[in-house]
């Protein structure tokens, strides 16, 4: 099973609306879709270290004070495929810049383009952006690659304690 991370930097927007930093993936799994910066954990790396590294590599932001917001399990054809640690942060340095992997964009939280994201994102990401914690399981069918499989079902648990699970 793949262990991965997602990180959602947040800031106050121009009209006091909150904004989230999303990326448009330029290659790999989910190419052309929006998501938070993130990726696969390397051997010996904690999920928190992975989220910091991936955010720096993909968009040039140095995130700190990460808050664990979710743990998501993705099943493909009944088998565990990916376990994803989700973080959010309001502490970062630098300005987001494009990379070969990602095009970053600050988006008002109320205007997140869920129609250009994974089919499950609209179920859990709004709650995460509002400050809630979530544990979820998402079931896909149709074989590899995961981004071409069909989303079929899910289970969510809100308000879970996650910091102790790291």
Image: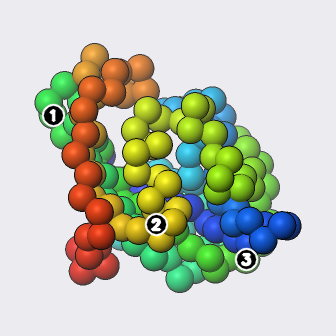
> Residue 16, image x and y in percent?
78, 71
- Which residue lies at the image location 24% right of the left edge and 80% below the top edge? 164
Question: Please, which residue is most extreme toward the top here?
Answer: 142
Q: Residues within 10 Å of mark 2 (few under 14, many from 20)?
A: many
Query: What residue sits right under mark 2 in the picture?
Result: 87
- Which residue lies at the image location 49% right of the left edge and 54% below the top edge? 126
Q: Earlier in the sequence, mark 1 or mark 2?
A: 1
> Residue 151, image x and y in percent?
33, 27
Q: How is the image coloured?
A: rainbow
Q: Which mark is residue 79?
A: 1
Please tell me whether mark 1 sits on a helix, a strand or a loop.
strand
Question: Please, which residue is most extreme toward the right here?
Answer: 14
Question: Please, which residue is most extreme toward the left here?
Answer: 78
Q: Is residue 59 visible?
A: no
What is the quadrant of residue 86 in the picture? bottom left
- The reply to whether the C-beta atoms of the residues labelled 1 and 2 are less than 8 Å apart is no
Query: What residue sits right under mark 3 in the picture?
Result: 93
Q: Is residue 157 visible?
A: yes
Q: Which mark is residue 47?
A: none
Please tell me whether mark 3 sits on a helix, a strand or a loop.
strand
- Which residue lies at the image location 68% right of the left edge and 47% below the top edge? 111
């Amino acid at each position: 099973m793949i262990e991965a991370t997602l990180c959602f930097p947040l800031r106050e927007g121009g009209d006091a609306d909150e904004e989230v930093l999303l990326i448009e993936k330029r290659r790999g799994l989910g190419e052309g879709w929006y998501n938070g910066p993130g990726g696969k954990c390397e051997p010996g790396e904690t999920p928190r270290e992975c989220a910091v590294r991936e955010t720096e590599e993909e968009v040039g932001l140095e995130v700190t004070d990460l808050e664990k917001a979710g743990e998501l399990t993705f099943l493909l054809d009944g088998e565990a495929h990916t376990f994803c640690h989700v973080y959010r942060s309001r502490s970062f340095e630098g300005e987001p810049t494009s990379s070969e992997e990602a095009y970053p964009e600050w988006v008002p939280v109320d205007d997140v383009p869920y129609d250009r994201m994974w089919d499950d994102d609209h179920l859990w990401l709004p709650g995460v952006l509002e400050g809630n914690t979530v544990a979820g399981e998402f079931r896909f069918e149709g074989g590899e690659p995961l981004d071409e499989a069909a989303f079929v079902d899910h289970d969510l648990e809100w308000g879970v304690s996650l910091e102790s699970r790291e």
